[in-house]
Amino acid sequence: MSTLFTGISELVTNDPSYGGPLGVIPHAALVVEDGRIAWVGDRGRAPAADQARDLGGRAVLPGFVDSHAHLVFAGERSAEFAARMAGERYDGGGIATTVAATRAASDDELRTLLAERVAEMRAQGTTTIEVKSGYGLSVADEVRALRLAGEVTSETTYLGAHVVPPGADRDEYVRLVAGEMLTACAPYARWIDVFCEPGSAHAFDADQSRAILERGRDAGLGLRVHGNQLSYGPGVGLAVELGAASVDHCTYLTDADVDALAQGETVATLLPGVEFSTRHPYPDARRLLDAGATVALATDCNPGTCYTSSMPFVIALAVRELGMTVDEAVWAATAGSARALRREDVGTVRVGLAADLAVLDAPSRAFLAYRPGVPLASTLPH
Ligand code: NIG
Ligand code: FE
C-alpha cells in the first residue's frame, strides 16, 4: 500500500544534497510505501500512489530523536522540584527516592508507565527513543529495567553507574557495576553510561568512571557519559578520550573541553530541560558550534532533573536560551541526536528509510520555537 502526502509547506530532509544542512524542500510531496519512504520531491513532480492525503500546508520533519531518556521508573519527585524552586540545590541525592519506588513496582506497573511515557513522546513527534536503566541499582533490578526498555526500543543503555545506592560501599559497588551486574545486563543493552560527577557525593569520579566504561567496552557496549552537569570536571575529557558516542549535559565546560569536543568524535548532547528544572545556568551551545563541535539535543526525561517528554519544548529552550538558531536546533534534535546514537537510518528523510516523520500543525519549523508550549508536533501516521 502506498500513500502520497501532498500539501507539505516545507519538508526538512537533513539531506544536504537539497541545499544547506537541513535540505529543506519547499512545496513538497512524499510517498510512503509499506512504512518506508519511497519518493520525496517537489509536489509538481509527485508520482501516483494507491491513496493520497493532503496535509493542508503543514511542515514535515524527520521524527525527533530523543537520545537521552530515563523512562523506566515509578513514583515522582514534584516536592523535590518545588524545594529547588525555593532555593535548594540538586546533587543527585533524590535518585535514591526513585530507586526505592522503582524496586517496589511490579513488572507490569513499570511496563505500563514506560508505555505511557513512550506514547507521550510519540504524540509530540518523537520516533526514536533511547532508554536508560539506572533506577534499579541491583543486578536483578537493572536487568529488569533493561529487559523492559528492550520491549520499546533497541537503544537501551545500562546505567548501573547512576549513583552509589544508599548503604552500599562505594568501591564494592563499582566492582559490582563493572563485574557481575555488567555481565548480567550486557545482553540487554546496546550502550553503557556513567554519571561522572566527582563533586557529587552520590556519583562517580574519573577513575571509577573509566574503569566501568572500559569494562563495558570490553563487553561490546558503546559508550555514553553523563558529564559536566553540576560543575567543571573530567567527564567530557574522559568521554572524548575513550571515543564515547556522546557526552551529555556539558553545562560547565572549560576551553580545553570545548577543544576536545571540536576535535574528537564525541557528540555534545545538551539537555536544557535540566537547567530549566534545576535553575543551573544553561549550557552554551553557541560556543560549541562556533568551535566546530557536533551538538545534539534531547529531553533527559526523568523524575528528578527534568520531567518533560517534549522535544519541541527542548528546541524552544535551545533557541531562546542556548544561543542556537532555529535550524541548528532542529538539526540537533534530529540528525544530531541520531549521530549521538551512531545511527544513520534515523533523523533524516531519505528514500528507503523508515517513514519516521514528525508533522507540525504549522507552516514552518520556526513555529517550534516561535509558539512555545503549543502542541503543534505529532508523529505522521501512515
Ligand atoms: O540526567 N544526572 C544524573 N541523572 C539524571 C537525573 C536523575 C534523577 O535525578 O533522578 C540526569 O539529570
Ligand atoms: Fe540523564
Image (cartoon, helix red, strand yellow):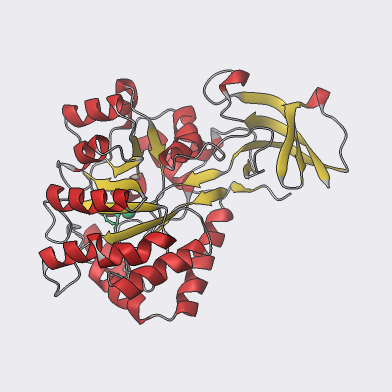
Residue 102 sits in quarter:
bottom left
The residue depicted at 34 percent of the width and 31 percent of the height is 265
Query: Can I make out residue 82 in this image?
Result: no
Looking at the image, which is closer to me, 60 or 3? Answer: 3
| Name of the residue lying farthest toward the front | 218
Measuring 25% from the left and 53% from the top, which residue is drawn there?
215
316 or 109, nearer to the observer: 109
Vertical arrangement, residue 338 with respect to residue 286, above or below: below
What residue do we see at 23% from left, 28% from top?
A: 260
Ligand 2's image quarter is bottom left
Q: Position of residue 19 (x, y in %)?
A: 58, 18
Q: Position of residue 277 (x, y in %)?
A: 31, 54
Residue 253 seen from this side? yes
Q: Is residue 219 above or below residue 23?
A: below
Residue 298, given in percent of the width and then of the height, sits at: 41, 46
Expressed as whole percent of the image width and height from the top left, the position of residue 92 reads 21, 60
Side (left or right) of 91 relative to 287 = left
In the picture provided, is 77 more to the left or to the right than 196? right
| Foreground of the two, 59 or 159 | 159
Q: Quadrant of residue 95?
A: bottom left
